[in-house]
Structures are given as structure tokens and as C-alpha cells.
Image (tube, rainbow, N blue to C red):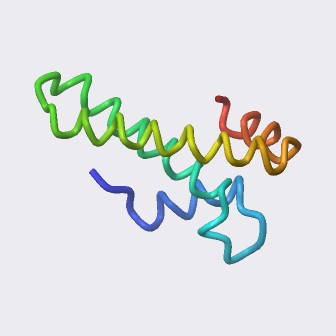
Amino acid sequence: MALTTAQKAKVLEKVRVHDKDTGSSEAQVALFTKEIEVLSKHLKKHQKDNSSRLGLLKMVAKRKRLLDFLKRSNPKRHASLLKKLDL
């Protein structure tokens, strides 16, 4: 269920800060958001997959922590990221 390299590149196109950006807060939040969407679709089919549900909850928590950090450190970038990702 992990994202392929092509999927990651497509997600990172929208939010990257520079051309080789993979570790910025914006990039990480975007990747977590895509993974969360994929896992949510999976869990709609497989309701009893509790290990995936736990992974989903952990990803949501990590994304929230990253968004909180970004909001504290740079509110303008936080607002623009939320618009780009439709959160």
C-alpha cells in the first residue's frame, strides 16, 4: 500500500520548496496526506484490518504535529499549504 516513486513525485510537485525538496515540513505533510487518503480507501473495503487502522491513526497524528510546527514557525507557509492540499 506504499506510494510508488511516481506517485510521490506527483504529490511533491505541488508543494516543494526547491527542486530537490523531500524533507521539508510541507513535503512531509503532503506525502502523509496522500498516504492517509490511500489507507482510508483501503479501510473502507477492509473494515477489520486493525493494523492498518493503527498505522492510519499514527500517520494522522504525525501530520498534525508537523502542521502545528509549521503553523508556529511560519504561518504564511502553513496557510498556503492548507490551500494547496485542501485541508
Residue lying at 60% horizontally and 47% vertically, measured from the top left: 66
Q: Work out whether residue 61 or residue 48 is closer to the camera in this orientation and state it.
A: 61
Q: Residue furthest bottom?
A: 20
Residue 36 placement: quadrant: top left
Q: Could you tell me which residue is drawn at 73 percent across and 74 percent down?
A: 19
Furthest toward the right, the residue is: 76
User: Quick check: 75 above or below 40?
Assistant: below
Count every numbered label the image shows and give the total: 0
- State the image coordinates of residue 65 (x, y, percent, origin top left): 57, 43
Quadrant showing the C terminus: top right
Give the x, y percent position of residue 75. 85, 41
Q: 47 or 60, which is in the foreground?
A: 60
Which quarter of the figure has residue 79?
top right
- Return the x and y of residue 42 as percentages of the image width and height: 26, 33
x, y percent for residue 73: 80, 50
Q: Tell me the residue at 35%/30% (across/down).
A: 40
Give the residue displayed 52% in from the left and 52% down from the top: 31
Left or right of 18 in this view: 48? left
Q: Is residue 9 left or right of residue 76?
A: left
Q: Is residue 26 above or below residue 67?
A: below
54 displayed left or right of 65: left
